[in-house]
Image (tube, rainbow, N blue to C red):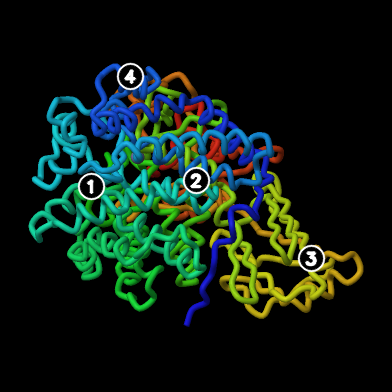
Amino acid sequence: MAIEWKLVSDKEVKVTDKYYDEALKIQVKNMLLLDADRLLAGFRETAGYIAGMNEEERTAFMKGKARYGGAWEDGMIGGHTLGHYITALAQAVANPGLSEDERGKVKERLDYMIDALKECQDKTAGTRFEGYIFGAILPTKEFQDNPAQQFDNVEKGLSNLFTEAWVPWYTMHKIVTGLNAAFALAGNDKALEVDNSLAEWIAKRSESWSEETHKTVLSIEYGGMNDCLYELYNINCYLKEQGNKRAYADPEIIKAAAHRFDEVALFEKVLAGAPNIMNNTHANTTIPKFIGALARYEVDRSETKYLEYAESFWDLVVNKHTYVTGGNSENEHFGEDNVLDAERTHVNNETCNTHNMLKFSRRLFAVTGNKKYLDYSENTLINAIMASQNHDTGFTTYFQPMATGYQKVFNTLDGNFWCCTGTGYENFTKLQRGIYYKADGRILVSMYLASKYENEEYRLTQECDLTVSDTVKITVSAKSESGFKDSLLLRVPTWVKSKMVVTVGGKRYEAVSCDEYIEIPAAILADAAKEAGKAELEIKLPMGITCHNLPDGHNTYAFCYGPYVLSARLGSKKIKETTHGVRVSVAAEKAVDSDELTITDEKSVESFIENIDKYLVKREDSCEFDLGGVSKPLVFTTHFNQYTESYGIYWKFVI
Ligand SMILES: [Zn+2]
């Protein structure tokens, strides 16, 4: 049986890496600049209609504020941002990377939002909408008389997103997840009350579905409704076990509602593994469904089939649909298996997808102990998530083009409340998650990132910056009298160019195995800590260039240096934006006519790639690389912090 790991608590880890720290701070600053009353306007309007308020009363209840614009918050998907926002605020409350003062401000904002939602929910008491809160626009009298009209429409299969329904269950998933986080991470009790009453509304509604209605509902994007309900079920079970009166009377009702969002027919199809089953499937509709399958296994370990569903979907996405950055999709959709080079455009790699795949991978690692999930997580956090932020403004991307020559395009403070804007808030307030895991008798360092991890037993400090040096220093001390009881596992990254070298207390440590992890037993740590009270470790991670082509682009290559995807700097002269889909800003112009590079100094592409160290050379004093031996020399740099220029990750090499 594989070891079961636990993600360590967000509260125990502080990222000290300067770049990550700045990324968190600027994100929180932006979040606090938003007007809470505008994010709440739709929820208050909905409650006002349900309570039968007249226009004047409603306007007063809404504090005279209107929803934000941009076609999303003032559209039928309105209110989804609030869900992300409260998740992100709850994470920020739990984040030791913020000062007490900053955390205080964030908590005040979160409490304000939850108080307001409770006030909205209280207005529904005794009505046929009891427990219901929602924030989308109510464009006609029909919607005003029935503020749950979107849900009725979905049950009839009506899904025109401007007039009938724009994925209301997707929005509901964001709201429930936010309430879960507000309780679980920020300890807001009122959030749980709102959450449980809302879940009761969801349970009642879904209970009445006929088989046909059920099918129709599941055919329209519903986010990870199963995931958030299993999570809420788990919270309630835990409270009930503790004899806590805040627990929902019968958590099984919530679990039964979660089951209704398990799309077993789809799960079976993926498990059966026919070719091209994901072709033309909306990626971010599908990924959360499988996170929900995993959640079912997480709450009930006898449901092993659901783990198989989750694992087979992850394999399919990562092995057949994923670019070097960890991202997937073209224009929000999966294509045919292994067709990636042909689908490199200006609209690849929706940020929600990498956000969800990262969440999925960490949880899959926890229950399986399979290292491949950690390798994917590290790569995706650095090269897709960190790469999604404009580090000057804190704004984030929707798409990240894989076609060569485009630039990243970011949201604005209050103009674009896209799905990815919301996941962006969430991404940057939990950057400490996934660096460390814990199991019985073991602590795992999963990522090499400057940080501090402190729990009741240990204090661990990690100092490094892999863009500057390949050496990591770890200091660990035991806090309790009983000393070191756990061994320390160091993940061996897939990208190391030669053997990882570890010294403990200045002495070279010869590991029994260094295939996946290097394990340092508690006794060795204790011995090293005998004199100074702390064990000092030095880890050398030999870094170098690795080359990555595409299954349908044998000669189309991307390059990495250690964990960093590199992209060529293509200047800022061709930066132009246009809109795509529902008012999504995207790149409009390429900075290069072609992504072909003719090799001048070798006789074949294979020999050029084999000798890449000769042609892609790191500058001594920076993380910049000069590519030579080709018709057009280029300068590459780490992709994650390329946000002012057009870029090129993939290049087609020809002779
Ligand atoms: Zn998105």
Q: Determine the residue positioned at 34% across, 24% down.
A: 67
Neighbours of disc 3 within 10 Å: few (<14), some (14-19), many (20+): some
- Label 1 to label 4, Cα distance in Å? 32 Å
- Label 3 to label 2, Cα distance in Å? 35 Å
Tell me the quadrant of ligand 1. Answer: top left
Neighbours of disc 1 within 10 Å: few (<14), some (14-19), many (20+): many
Q: Amino acid at mark 1?
A: Glu
Q: Is mark 1 within 8 Å of ligand 1?
A: no
556 to the left or right of 465: left
**Residue extending furthest toward the front:** 126
131 to the left or right of 1: left
- Label 2 to label 1, Cα distance in Å? 27 Å
Q: Which residue is mark 2?
A: 383
Q: Determine the residue positioned at 70% across, 58% down.
A: 454
Q: Which residue is mark 1?
A: 221
Query: Regarding mark 1 in the picture, which secondary structure is present there?
Result: loop
Is tag 1's residue or tag 3's residue first in the polypeptide sequence?
A: 1
- Label 2 to label 4, Cα distance in Å? 45 Å
Mark whose residue sits in front, 1 or 4: 4
Q: Is mark 3 within 8 Å of ligand 1?
A: no
Q: Determine the residue positioned at 21% across, 28% down.
A: 138
Q: Quadrant of the C terminus?
A: top left
- Residue 22 location (% of width, % of height): 62, 35
- Label 3 to label 4, Cα distance in Å? 56 Å
- Label 1 to label 3, Cα distance in Å? 49 Å
Q: Amino acid at mark 4?
A: Thr
Residue 598 visible at all: no
Q: Which residue is mark 3?
A: 479
Q: Is residue 560 above or below residue 648?
A: below
Mark whose residue sits in front, 2 or 1: 1
